[in-house]
Image (cartoon, helix red, strand yellow):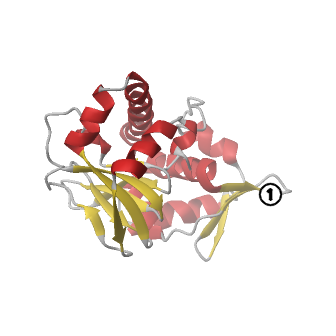
Amino acid sequence: MKENDVTATNLYSLFEHFGSIIKIEKDRPVFSEGERSEEVYFIQSGSVRISKDTESGRILTLRISGALTFIGEASVFCETIYHSVSATAIEPTQVLALSRSQLEKLLTTSPVNMMEWMKLIQAHNLKNETRFRDLLLHGKKGALFSTLVRLSNTYGVQQENGSILINYSLTNQELANFCATSREVVNRMLNDLKNNQIISFQKGIITIHDFAFLRKEIECDNCPIDICRVD
């Protein structure tokens, strides 16, 4: 997804002109939490999981970034010089890397590029804000329900009977990581939803039959679709 409709054509061009190509194998890190933040990355192909370790030792998946999106962006124009999250390739991935200092210079010399960058960062901030809101206000159940809503907005395919098939395979452990909880807790909640005919699932593919129920349970604020996503 091209930064979810945030216009960033000039930013793409900067990375294509000045960036260096890096290829990352599946399950290998692009960068890790706590490492020095020296570069910003533009994903040309593949996808990357952005995650954070919690105090309880669990992993919290914040987003899945695909082609034509940026990662490692949080440190730009910031005194923080260490990555606050980890980025791991979930399939063979190719990125363009541009040094943070060079990107800052390129942005400060172009008001148009700076405006595009501000829009991009604001979109990321809004996404994070809504994710943490759901987790804090509605607990594990809210985190799972809101993740299902975001997955449907990102990968959903409308079916003839009105159901929404999430065309993206996830294990229960991967779903649990979106909620910073255990696989067993997610198993129970998914089975409850299945027994109540809210969802069904087969071979890692989830179909939502009552989308309105999930939105009601998390008191959905009717966020724009480009904000209520997992990417």
* Identity of the residue drawn at 25% across and 33% down: 105
* Identity of the residue drawn at 30% across and 34% down: 106
- Asked if residue 121 lies left or right of residue 151, the reply is left
Would you say residue 63 is visible in this rendering?
Answer: yes
Q: Is residue 167 above or below residue 116?
A: below
Residue 32 location in percent, x, y? 22, 60
Which residue lies most toward the front here?
Answer: 17
Residue 219 location in percent, x, y? 55, 33
The kind of residue tagged 1 is Gln
- Asked if residue 209 lies left or right of residue 84, the reply is right
Q: Residue 183 sits in which quadrant?
A: bottom left
- Asked if residue 108 lies left or right of residue 150, the reply is left
Of 100 and 192, nearer the camera is 100
Would you say residue 185 is visible in this rendering?
Answer: no
Q: Residue 136 sits in which quadrant?
A: top left
Of 203 and 12, nearer the camera is 12
Residue 204 location in percent, x, y? 58, 72
Which residue lies most toward the top here?
Answer: 111
Of 196 and 35, nearer the camera is 35
* Element type where label 1 sits in the image: loop
Dot 1, crowdedness within 10 Å: few (<14), some or many (≥20)? few
Q: Is residue 90 above or below residue 147?
A: below
Residue 54 location in percent, x, y? 23, 54
* Identity of the residue drawn at 47% across and 45% down: 142
Q: Is residue 74 above or below residue 204?
A: above
Look at mark 1 in the image and give the residue it sits on. 159
Which residue lies most toward the right here?
Answer: 160
